[in-house]
Amino acid sequence: MRILVCISKTPDTTAKIAFTDNNTKFAEAGVQFIINPYDEWYALVRAIELKEADPSSVIHLVTVGGADAEPVIRKALALGGDEAIRVNVDVADSFAVASQIAAVATAGGYDLVLTGKETIDYNGSAIGGMLAELLGMPYIALATKVDVAGGTATVTREIEGGEEVAEVALPVVISCQKGVAEQRIPNMKGIMSARTKPLKVVEPVAVEALTTVHHFELPPAKAGVKLVSPESVGELVRLLHEEAKVF
Amino acid sequence: MSVLIFADQSEGHIKKAAFEALSYGAALAKNMNTTAIAVVLGPVSADGAAELGKYGVSKVLLAATDALAHLDGQAFAAAVAQAATQEGAQVVVFPHNPDGKAVAPRVAVRLKAGLVAGAIDLPDLSGGGFVVRKNVFSGKAFAYVSVTSPIKVISLNPNSFHVQAGDGKAEVVAFAPDAVAPRVKVTAVNKVSGEVPLSEAEIVVSGGRGLKGPENWGLVEDLAHVLGAATACSRPVADAHWRPHHEHVGQTGLTIRPNLYIAIGISGAIQHLAGVNGSKVIVVINKDPEAPFFKAADYGIVGDAFDVVPKFTAAVKELKGK
C-alpha cells in the first residue's frame, strides 16, 4: 500500500500569538515551530503502524512551504516514513495548498492519503476535503479509527453525539484526530536515519488563491475573574442567571 | 441570485447547527438583497422541510431519498453544487459540524469558490468586499478573511449565530440531484443516547484530575443534568480512561464554544484553553488559587469541588424550581 501523509508546520501550542505588519502577518520571531499535532500524533503515527503491519507499504510525507519547513519535515521523518516531498512555495490559502498536494498525490499514485483534522494555526479543516475533490476520491473527515484490509478502509468518524462506522474502497483521503493512534517520541535511530532519507523539493503548479487574510486581531483582554466565596455558591448562581444571563 | 444553505439532517430531523446556518444565511441574503434557499438531502418530510421557513428561507429544495440518508461526501457535494448552480447561488452556507466539514471543502472546489471554514460573524460587505471573521490559532486570535472568488462558501461555527425563528413557511420543491455512484457504505451509527451532544451544547460542565477518579463523576453529571448541559473532560482524564475520548475538549480534542463552560478541577493548561476559550462565559472551580484557568475565567470559586459542586447543583435546582 502506498500512503501519503500531509504534514504542516505550525507554531508550538504554547507559542505567543502576535502579529506584525499592521496585523497582517503572524509574528514568527522567537516562535518554535512544530509538526501540526493532528498530522503528527494521529495521521503519521497511524501510517507508521499500518506499515509495521504490512512492511511492503511505502510512506511518503508531503509539505507545502519554503525551506524553513525542512526542520519540521525532518522531524517527521525521524518518527517514520520513507521519503518526504516539499512543494517549494509559500502557503497562500487552503485551496492553493490542496492544489499543490493534489499534484504530488496524482504523480505518486497513493492508496491512502492521511491528514490531520485541522491545523492548529488556521483551523481550516479544509485540506482533506479539497484534496479529495481534486483527486476524485472519497473523503472521511474527523476519523477516530482507521483500519485497512483487502483494499477497503474501515473508518470510524465523529458525528454529533456519537460515532459512525463506514467502509470505503481505496483510494481514500482521511482526516485524523484523537483515537486514530497514540503519540510517539522519535528514537535515536529514527533521528539518525532521518538525516539520510530523501527529501525531494518540487516546484509548485500554477494556482491562484481564492481567499486572503485581510488582517488579524487579538481578542479583547478578559475583564478579570470575579471570585465568589465557596461559602456563597448561591451568589454565583445568581450572577450567572441575572448578570451573565446564561441560564 | 441567492444564498443557498445546506440544512443537514440526522434520522429525518434537521440538526440544530443547521438552524443557526439557516438564520445566518437568511440574514446574509437580506444584506445582499437576495433570497435565502435551503437544500435538504435525505429522508425529511415535506412538512418538516416547510418548517425551515421559520428561519427565513423562502424555498427548500428537498431530495427526500433514503439513498442520501447517510453522508457520502461525493454524492452530497455534487448535489449541493448542482443546487447552487441551479439557483444561481452567490454564497453557499454550511454548518461547521462533522458533515459540513466533510462537504463544504468539496463544494468550494467544485464551484471554484473561496472557503471560509468556521466563520463566526456575518460577512462585511462594505466597499463591495466580502470579509468574514473566523477563529484562528485555536481561538487565540481572529482572522478577517477576504474572499475574492465570484462564488463564496462559508461554514458557520456552532454557537456563533443566534437562531432567529419567526413563523414563515417555505415553499418545498422536490429536488432530484444527478445520481452519483455511492462510495461510502455506513455500517453502524453509535449515538450516546439521552445526553446532549457536546458539540451542540449551550452549557458544558467539564471535569479534570481534581475530581480524583471516575467514581466521582456523579458530581459533574448531577450539575450537568440540572442545567441541561453536556459533560466534558480534560485530556489527562480521557487518557486515564476515566471518561470516553469523545468528551475530551482541548487543543487535540474537541473545540467547543458554548454559552457557559464550567470547569471543575481543571488547572487550565494552554492546550485545554485552546479548546474552550471561545466560550462566552467561563466558570472555574478549583482549590488552587494559582490555577492558570482563573486568568481566563469570568467567574471563579477557589474551593474544594467536593464541597462546592453539590451546593452549586442544589442552588440551580432551587432557581429552576421557582
Image (spheres, coloured by chain):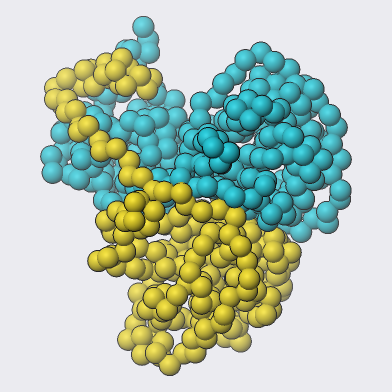
Q: Is residue A162 visible?
A: no
User: Quadrant of residue B94 in the image?
Assistant: top right
Q: Is residue A88 above or below residue B15?
A: below
Is A141 placed left or right of A235 in the picture?
Answer: right
Chain identifier of the yellow chain? A
Is A230 placed left or right of A79 in the picture?
Answer: left
Q: Who is closer to the viewer here, B176 or B305?
A: B176
Q: How many marks?
A: 0
Is B184 placed left or right of B210 in the picture?
Answer: right
Q: Is residue B75 visible?
A: yes
Q: Residue at x 29, y 37 (%)?
A: A220
User: Which colour denotes chain B?
Assistant: cyan
User: Where in the figure is residue B296, as x and y percent of width and height?
Assistant: 25, 40
- Residue reaching furthest to the bottom: A196
Q: Who is closer to the viewer here, B233 or B307?
A: B233
Q: Is residue A5 above or below residue A136?
A: below
User: Where in the figure is residue B129, as x and y percent of width and height?
Assistant: 56, 41
Check the picture and name the quadrant holding the N terminus of chain A. bottom right
Q: Is residue B259 above or below residue A37?
A: above
User: Where in the figure is residue A127, as x and y percent of width and height?
Assistant: 57, 60
Q: Residue at x 36, y 42 (%)?
A: B276
Q: Residue at x 45, y 62 (%)?
A: A38
- Residue reaching furthest to the front: B127
User: Where in the figure is residue A63, as x and y percent of width and height?
Assistant: 50, 73
